[in-house]
Image: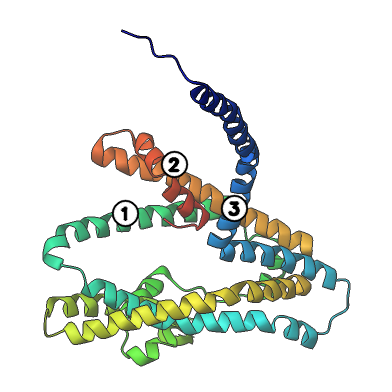
Amino acid sequence: MEEIQPSSNDLDELDSVEATEPQETQTRHKYNKPSADVPSSQNGSNIVAFLKRNAFVVLTVIAVALGIGLGFVLRHINMSPSDIQYLTFPGELLLRILQMLALPLIVSSLISGMSSVDTKAYGKIGMRAFGYYLVTTMTAAFTGIALALLIQPGNSSRNTSVSSGGKTGTVQPVDSFLDLLRNMIPSNLVEACFRKVWSTMADLIFCLYLPGTSNGVNFFGLLVFCVAFGLILGNMETEGKPLKDFFDSLNKAIMQFVSIVIWYSPVGILFLLAGQIVKMIDIGEIGHEVAMYAVTVITGLVIHSLFTLPLIYFIVTRKNPYRFMSGILQAITTAFGTSSR
C-alpha cells in the first residue's frame, strides 16, 4: 500500500489556517478587555433604576431638607404674619387635598374590601384577627400611657406657664367612654362627615357634662357603618353585585386620583416645614420637646415589638418568637418606621 504524501497546496492551506488562528484569539482577547468596565456601568444603571423606583421617597427627603434649610435662612428676615401665611400657602393646599381625599378613600376602600370577604369561610379567622388586634391595641395603649407618665414629653416651662393661668374642668373617663360609644353610632351620617360628639361641661358645681359637637370628621362612626354595610353587601350575592361593582370602581378611581395628587406632597412639605420653622419662637425648647417625644415613641415601639408581641407569640405557639421575627424583618422595620402596630 502506497503512502499518500501531502501536496504543496495542502501545506499552503494548513499554513494559512495556522496563521489565522492567533489572529482570532487576539481579536477575542481584544473584545474581552473592556469587560472590566461592565460592573461600573451596571452600578450606574442600578442607581438610576433605584432612583426611578423610589423617586417619591427621594423627592420627599430632599423637600424635607430644603424646607428645614429654607426655614432657618428665612428666620433672619423679619417676616410679617401675612408673609408667613403666603409662604405656607402651598402646604395649606396639601393639607386640604389630604383632607378632601381621606373621607372618600376610607369609605370606598372599607366597603369594597368588606364586601369581598366571605364571612362563612373566614369567620373564625376574622374573629381571631379581631381578638389579636384588640389585645395588641390595649397593650400598646397601656404601654404608651405608662411611658407618657414616666417620661412626660410634653412637660415644659412653656406649657406650665400657660396652664397656670386658670383652671378648667377635665372630662371624666366615664364621659369619654360614653362619647366613644356615641361616636360609634352616629345619629346622622352626613353630619358625621364633618362633626363628632364631644361632651362639654354644663354645670361646674355638679360637674355635669352634656353631649355636644365639635368640628372634625367622625371617622370611628363612619368606619363602623362602612364595615357593617360592606359585610351585608357581600352576603347579598347577586342582588348586591351592582352596588359592589360601584364601590369597587369608586375605590380604583380614588386610588388613581391619590397616586396622581401625592406627587404634590414634596412641594407642600417644603413650604409647610419652612413656614413652621419661621413661626418658632424658642427653637431650643421646641427641639427639646420634639426630642423627648421621639424618645417616648421609639421606646414604646421597641417595647411593643421586642417584648409584647414576642410574648403573645410565645404564649400562643410555645415557640421561639425571635426566630420567627427574623423571617419577617422587612415588615417589622416598615412597621417601626411608620409607628404601626
Q: Toward which corner of the image does residue 317 lie, by quadrant?
A: top left
> Cβ–Cβ below 8 Å for labels 2 and 3?
no
Q: What element carries label 1?
A: helix
Q: Which mark is residue 306?
A: 2
What's the residue at 70%, 76% (across, down)? 271
Tag 1 residue:
135
Q: Where is residue 63 in the image (x, y as percent from the top left)?
A: 68, 67
Q: Position of residue 231 (x, y in %)?
A: 20, 75
Left or right side of 324 for 35: right
Q: Residue 45 carries which label?
A: 3
What's the residue at 55%, 25% (across, down)? 12
Q: Quadrant of the N terminus?
A: top left
Colouring mode (rainbow / by chain / secondary structure / one colour): rainbow
Q: Which of marks 1 and 2 is in front?
A: 2
Q: What element carries label 3?
A: helix
Left or right side of 114 for 279: right
Query: Which callout, 2 or 3, points at the residue further toward the start of the chain?
Result: 3
Q: Toward which corner of the image does residue 208 lie, by quadrant?
A: bottom left
Q: Quadrant of the C terminus?
A: bottom left
What's the residue at 12%, 85% (across, down)? 239
The answer to whether residue 98 shows anywhere in this view is yes
Q: Classify mark 1: residues with Cα within 10 Å, few (<14), some (14-19) or many (20+).
A: few
Label 3 is placed on what type of residue? Ser
Q: Nearer the viewer, mark 2 or mark 3?
A: 3
Question: Along the line of sight, which residue is nearer the eye, 203 or 182?
Answer: 182
The answer to whether residue 152 shows anywhere in this view is no
Q: Toward which corner of the image does residue 175 lie, by quadrant?
A: bottom left
Question: Along the line of sight, which residue is nearer the eye, 15 or 70?
Answer: 15
Label 1 is placed on what type of residue? Val
Q: Residue furthest front?
A: 2
Q: Nearer the viewer, mark 1 or mark 3?
A: 3
